[in-house]
Image (spheres, rainbow, N blue to C red):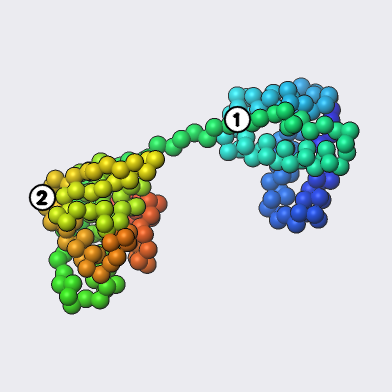
Amino acid sequence: MQQINISGYLDYCRDQLDLSEHSLKAYHQDLSAFIRFQKLDNRTGEVTSDVLLEYLKYLREEIQSSAATIRRRFITLRSYFVWVSKSNASIANPFQDFRLDVKQPQRLPRPVDRPTLSVLFQNIGHLVEIDVSQESSKTAIFQFSQEQITGLVARILIVTGMRVGEITNLRLKDISGACTRIRVRGKGNKERTVYVTNERLVIDFRNYWETRLSFGDPNAYLFLNSRGARLTEAAFRKRLRAISKSLL
């Protein structure tokens, strides 16, 4: 079996590349995984591109590793054999004629679950109207509570069918003056128009939008977090979970 010199490679990575202990530990795990594979069927010969294909099949089908794990294993192995072939010209690099094709599965956008929305809608009131002429920019924006803004976003999602990632990327200029039309940039930067048809929602939405627009650049993001930065998709989902738990 072609021996994998883990200690020698890690010494090189530590001394010459100044890699962190975290990286060294990951490299050790990746190379150890390949050694375990070699021992399974007592693969005593040279590591070739055919052996790499067998290893790829083993990771995919037998132990069902994720695409990310497979990619990391092969990146480490490739780096190792580059180092070996430079250190010893008699050892061929099996990656010379090998092409790795590991597709990362696409993750579909997660919908906001109905139980969470049901609790939210039952317990959060409409947006309050404020006199923007009497408020500073920051104070006016945050007269709307976190719960109210979260509820407004959720209601718009339900009425328009937008994705969470789409609504959190909206800017003030994407909203029509009557707040009944929204310009959405979807996958591939393709644009479409969605409509807000619920009368009560339009009133609340316009109240919020006009307040934001009175003090903000039209290019600014529509929905903000507590620090005044863009409300991210992850933060919105976290808000929903926190609010729904507090109301149960």
Residue at 76% x, 22% y: name it: 41
**Image coords of residue 149 (percent x, y):** 26, 58
Q: Secondary structure at mark 1?
A: loop
Which residue reaches farthest left? Answer: 199
Residue nearest the observer in this picture, 19 or 148: 19
Neighbor class of circle 2 (other Cα within 10 Å; few <14, some 14-19, many 20+) is few
- The quadrant in which the N terminus is found is top right
Placement of 86 over or under 223, stated as above or below: above
Residue at 37% x, 40% y: name it: 187
Q: Is residue 152 toward the left or the right of residue 93 in the image?
A: left
Residue nearest the observer in this picture, 59 or 189: 189
Q: Amino acid at mark 1?
A: Asp
Q: Amino acid at mark 2?
A: Glu
Question: Which mark is in front, 2 or 1?
Answer: 1
Placement of 165 over or under 63, stated as above or below: below
- Asked if residue 163 can be seen in this view, the reply is no
Count the labels in the image: 2
Dot 1 corresponds to which residue? 101
Residue at 25% x, 70% y: name it: 215
**Image coords of residue 179 (percent x, y):** 17, 53
**Image coords of residue 232 (percent x, y):** 38, 54
Q: Is residue 225 toward the left or the right of residue 205 in the image?
A: right
Neighbor class of circle 1 (other Cα within 10 Å; few <14, some 14-19, many 20+) is few
Q: Which mark is residue 53?
A: none
**Image coords of residue 201 (percent x, y):** 15, 52
Whichever of callouts 2 and 1 sits on the residue coming sooner in the sequence is 1
Q: Secondary structure at mark 2?
A: helix
Dot 2 corresponds to which residue? 199
Q: Is residue 23 toward the left or the right of residue 242 in the image?
A: right
Q: Is residue 239 toward the left or the right of residue 91 in the image?
A: left
Mark-to-mark CA distance, 2 and 1: 51 Å
